[in-house]
Amino acid sequence: MSLVNRSAYPGSPAMPADAPSGTARKAVRILNGVFDALSAHQVVDDIVRAISAGQRGVVCTVNVAILMMMRSNPRLQRFADAARWTVADGQPLVWASHLGRTNLPERVTGADLIDLLCARAAREGIGVYFLGASEAIARQAVDALRKKHPGLDVRGWADGYFGPDEASDRADAIVQSGAQLLFVAMGVPRQEYFIEEQWGRLGARVAIGVGGSLDVIAGLRKRAPRSAQRLGLEWAYRLAQEPRRLFMRYLVTNSQFLGLIAWDPIVHAARSLRPARRGQ
């Protein structure tokens, strides 16, 4: 695993990261992913500062399954590379970072970011919008967040079940709401494609794809206990809840990830020897 300068990934023309020139922070490359070496609270602080400064940016949460998907999906790979913040939503990624010079401080999940960002948004008057899941689930999640964070300024919410011809209408509703912070819960890569395609008209300062997090917040799906999360066993807890849907995904992607992690140092060592051989 290698240390990189995050400023080398400033954003694509479709998703400009309006960070001040010269801004740089430590990040860690794990295989084909570049992750910010930030805790969840540091990410939230950074996002709130960007919103307060009138800047824009996208947050990309990447777990092992998404990292493996990126290897065969160039568009998704470009999205992650262009994001202003890319965080590791998986304990195996945190463990893998320990093989390099800089460690990722912790796992940063979409559900945790929603909770922490809504807490800050309620205190600082930041308007939020939720897009994704069914209308009933979105409403339940919004009600739960309003109850937990009194004063939360929810500018609106809408379900994620719409066709390509309706995407612009969803984007118009978001910009008309005046929300500064947008949570998109439509699954990978659909949520990333929506953010990328509509970024120029969304109006929101910060957008973040949060996958199935609204289901968790609405109480439809339970998260593992904190002790299991710290041990990196949340995947097993989720597998027990959804074995049919998740068994093959975890089996294939986790096996692929472990194999690539084991092989990566060998590849880098071989590459480092090539110049020396040519010079002999």
Image (spheres, rainbow, N blue to C red):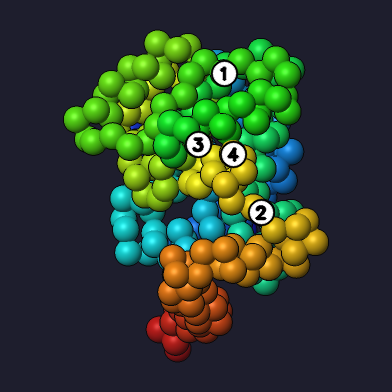
Q: Are marks 2 and 1 in contact (CB under 8 Å)?
A: no
Q: Residues within 10 Å of mark 3 (few under 14, many from 20)?
A: some
In the image, taking residue 11 as reference, residue 128 lies left or right, namely: right
Residue position marked by numbered label 3 in the rendering: 137
Residue kind at label 1, given as amino acid type: Val
Residue position marked by numbered label 4 in the rendering: 218
Residue kind at label 4, given as amino acid type: Ala
Q: Is residue 174 above or below residue 89?
A: above
Whether residue 55 can be seen here: no
Residue kind at label 3, given as amino acid type: Ile
In the image, taking residue 275 as reference, residue 34 lies left or right, namely: right
Q: Which mark is residue 223?
A: 2
Q: Are marks 1 and 4 in contact (CB under 8 Å)?
A: no
Query: From the viewer's perspective, is the residue at label 3 or at label 2 nearer?
Result: 3
Q: Give the CA separation, mark 2 to mark 1.
A: 24 Å
Residue position marked by numbered label 1 in the rendering: 154
Q: Are marks 3 and 2 in contact (CB under 8 Å)?
A: no
Q: Residue at x 56, y 32 (%)?
A: 140
Where is residue 270 drawn, in percent x and y? 48, 84
State which tag comes first along the sequence, 4 or 2: 4
Q: Secondary structure at mark 2?
A: loop
Q: Is residue 267 above or below residue 95?
A: below
Q: Residue at x 41, y 19 (%)?
A: 174
State which tag comes first along the sequence, 3 or 1: 3
Residue kind at label 2, given as amino acid type: Arg
**Which quadrant does the N terminus fall into?**
bottom right
State which tag comes first along the sequence, 1 or 4: 1
Q: Residue at x 61, y 26 (%)?
A: 143
